[in-house]
Image: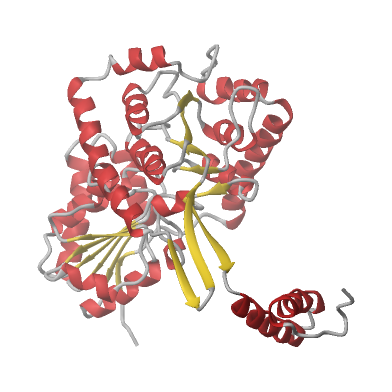
Amino acid sequence: MSNYKHLKSPAPPAPANEGQSSSLDVATIVQGVIEDVRSNGDSAVRKYSKQFDRWSPPSFKLSEEQIHKIIATVPEQTIKDIKTVQSNVRAFAEAQKASMKDFEIEIRPGIHLGQKNVPIQNVGCYVPGGRYPLLASAHMTILTAKVAGVPNVIACTPPIAGEIPTATIAAMYYAGADAIYLLGGTQAIAAMALGTETIPKVDFICGPGNAFVATAKAKLYGSIGIDLFAGPTEVLIVADEHASSFTVAVDLLSQAEHGPDTPAVLITTSERLAKEAIAHVEKILTETEMSTSALAGTSWRDYGEVIVVENIDEAYSLADTFASEHVQILTQNPREALDKMKNYGALFLGERTCVSYGDKVIGTNHVLPTKGAARYTGGLCVQKFLKTYTYQEVKSDQASGELGQLCGRAARAERFEGHARSGDRRAQLYLGNKYKWIYE
């Protein structure tokens, strides 16, 4: 039996009624906004935008002229960086698309089966704002949808404290959004999912967001498709005795700053490294004037975890039980994780790589499964925007007649007489079979 040693455990959970109350408040508010938007359209959207974001312009949709004026205020280096990052994202997304092939095969003489990948026609992308202008989410959602071939992509992002997030607008524009709305929160998700007088209804919504955005997507799922049921960002580091404890600490905090509820977990084979990493985290938080130390410190205190295991195989096995969103491998042989691990949103291999690269610049998608969902799904990718359809055509009389005989037997074994008769009819037409029920 494995013997894990916890050097740091998460803080005790809040009392059940406290957590349930908070969750219930979010769900109740979200449901109220959705129903109001469903009934009252634009007037409800405007009411909640003014209430939650202090934003009530004549039109939430930005005109081409407004977009270009906004982009003109963005520093030239930021525009160059946006284009470089989008080039990376585009290259990876195009490779993903190339891996998905349409095909047609003749499985038996005269029986042709095929597959086609057809893009979703109308997609809504949510680019969060809130605490930070998360322009990278524009690359991951809008650009990936356009590479998949989606003809109509609308995108929403909230103002930040009543101000326009100029760099985010630039990223949305260069990613290829067909329409940009300066609108956030539940009201944005509801407007895209339901449609209003001025905001068209979409078929699919993607993109990260806070608890209100995630809850709205979950509640509207079914009437529209969504990418993932999202939770707080997660990071898990697997490290051996060869890793730098300072690098481990820096990388744990790089994700902990996302919010006050980010799980940051270290699993290591070295107790020495574990203790040093904990010490470095505390020192960075208290002595280096990190601007996001309050958020990162709260996550570390309440959700940080450090576990020492006996060997690297136990480390990988334990990491798989977390099924974390981001899994960083800081070991002497990081690529062995590709064979050893099965449950993760994305792997980051070796000290030269870090989760922040994935979040911001490297090109793979940063919209990833959380809360253990990596056990059954991957993250956002070109495939999420494609509907894989099948088609069938029987081209020979003999093949159709023989299939008809097979279908008749198979359907009657399941007591589906109507299905059987469709098969009988083909056997009659193409093989000349006689059936008592056929009166023609």
Rendering coords of residue 201 (x, y %): 60, 34
Q: Write the residue at 65% across / 33% down.
A: 33
Out of 230 and 10, give the one closest to the viewer. 230
Q: Nearer the viewer, residue 139 or 168?
A: 139
Quadrant of the rendered image containing residue 399: bottom right
Q: Is residue 200 in view from this perspective? A: yes
| Quadrant the N terminus occupies | bottom left
Relative to the observer, which residue lies in front, 424 or 170?
A: 424
Query: In the picture shown, does residue 136 fall above or below 331?
Result: above
Image position of 300 (left or right of 405): left
Which of the two residues, 372 or 285, is positioned nearer the viewer here?
Answer: 372
Please say if 211 is above or below 338. Answer: above
Residue 176 screen position, x and y as percent: 37, 32
Q: Where is residue 250 in the image (x, y as percent from the top left)?
A: 19, 50
Q: Which residue is drawn at 67% across and 41% down?
A: 28
| Number of marks | 0
Image height check: is 53 above or below 99?
above
| Left or right: residue 267 compared with residue 367 | left
Residue 140 placed where, x, y %? Answer: 35, 42
| Image colouring | secondary structure
In the displayed structure, 310 sits above or below 13; it is below
Instruction: Determine the residue positioned at 17% across, 53% down.
Output: 280
Answer whether residue 380 is visible to the viewer in this image.
no
Q: In this view, does 273 lie to the left or right of 356?
A: left
Q: In which quarter of the image is the C terminus?
A: bottom right
Identify which residue is drawn at 36% across, 39% down. Answer: 143
